[in-house]
Image: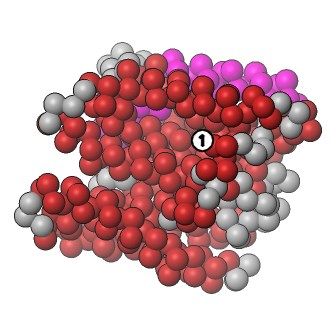
Amino acid sequence: MDNVNTFTIRPQILALTGLRFFAASMVFLFHSGAGFALKIGAPISVVNFLSNGFLGVSLFFVLSGFVLTYTYRDGVSSKKKYLLARFARVYPVYMLALIVSLPLVYANLHFSDYVFVLGMVQSWTPYNSSYGFMWIMQAWTISVELFFYLTFPFLIVFLKKIPTKIGLIFLIVIMFLIINFGLSTISPGSNRPEYPLWINFVILPVLRFPEFCLGAIVCRIYLNNISYLNKFPKKYLDLSIFINLLLIVFILSRYSIQSYSILSVATLLFVVLILLFSLGDSIFSRAISCNVLVLLGGASYAEYILQGPIREWVRLFLPSSVIGQIISPVILIAVSIFVYVFYETPVRRRILNQL
């Protein structure tokens, strides 16, 4: 779950930073709103839309591949500096979230849990294992991201060497894998008896790796053909984004988790949306590039990983579930912005100053 920020050597694509806030909010609404909507008898389209909010994770994975490739378009010149930058990006807030949630879960933790979670490898298990949810549920995706970060220096070398036509072939293969296996709907503890037996021996990050590659390959094609793509008629850019958003909303509100292949089509629409936002100015890109959404996008990592701990602490101190559901999002946003401004950014800057 990466981000274009002031510490990269490339100009920001502010619309993609703002988009991160919506990805984090999708996941938050999935955890906090889907059950409530079902309980009060909301329309099935609303229930489906909220229940499919977990696909915000897929949006994060695709964004990560795209932004890392955009940032390191010339390759990773120093693996040491690259790894330190990745560490500075994720681990300080990750550790903060673990500390905040520890009083709530320590009674259920064993020594091995501390080792795997602190090492960020709790999701490096077969997809049908729920071990990745240990300690903080949302942290399973950070464990998957670590796998992406470690493989990216090799991926970018490969992508730089292949021509656009070969990249398109790989793109088609990856899209087929994502849709055919419904990879965007797989999380720890998933049950897919229709899968081939050998997939039970594949660790979860490998199964989610195609989404990261999807973003990386599309970015590489974009960079290799930027002069041509920039000729895309601006008058059609807003229309294209609007249609893309309509298709995403339709899929998320029309289908349930049982239609995992169709839901995974949303991932392909996510990468199209990212590409469209990268092509230039539009009404939509200007809207999500405003200062408020860029700030919220910057705070989206803290929002994402702290949502579980904050929700549980609110439940502990507020006996009324209704009041808790109302106040929890407000507290989460406020805490996330505070963490981003006064902890995440200064700590990351201090670590990066060591480069």
50 lies left or right of 290: left
Kindly identify the amino acid type of the residue bearing the numbered disc 1: Val
Relative to 121, say whether 194 is above or below. above
Observer-nearest of 182 and 118? 182
- The residue at the point 72 percent across, 26 percent down is 170
- Tell me which secondary structure the magenta stretch mostly adopts: helix
How many numbered marks are there? 1
Q: Quadrant of residue 43?
A: top left
Q: Residue furthest right?
A: 227
Relative to 209, say whether 287 is above or below. below
Does any portion of residue 225 appear in the rendered image? Answer: no
Magenta span includes 183: yes
- The residue at the point 20 percent across, 66 percent down is 314
Observer-nearest of 318 and 347? 318
From the image, which quarter does the C terminus lie in? bottom right
Magenta span includes 330: no
Q: Quadrant of residue 9?
A: bottom right
Which region is colored magenta?
Answer: 162-189
- The residue at the point 21 percent across, 73 percent down is 103
Q: Residues within 10 Å of mark 1 (few under 14, many from 20)?
A: many
SS at mark 1 in the image: helix
Name the residue that disc number 1 marks: 62
Observer-nearest of 122 and 56? 56
Q: Quadrant of residue 78?
A: bottom right
The image shows residue 169 at horizontal and vertical percentages of 76, 21
Relative to 265, say whether 99 is above or below. below
- The residue at the point 77 percent across, 24 percent down is 168
The image shows residue 248 at horizontal and vertical percentages of 50, 28
The image shows residue 6 at horizontal and vertical percentages of 70, 70
The image shows residue 152 at horizontal and vertical percentages of 68, 49
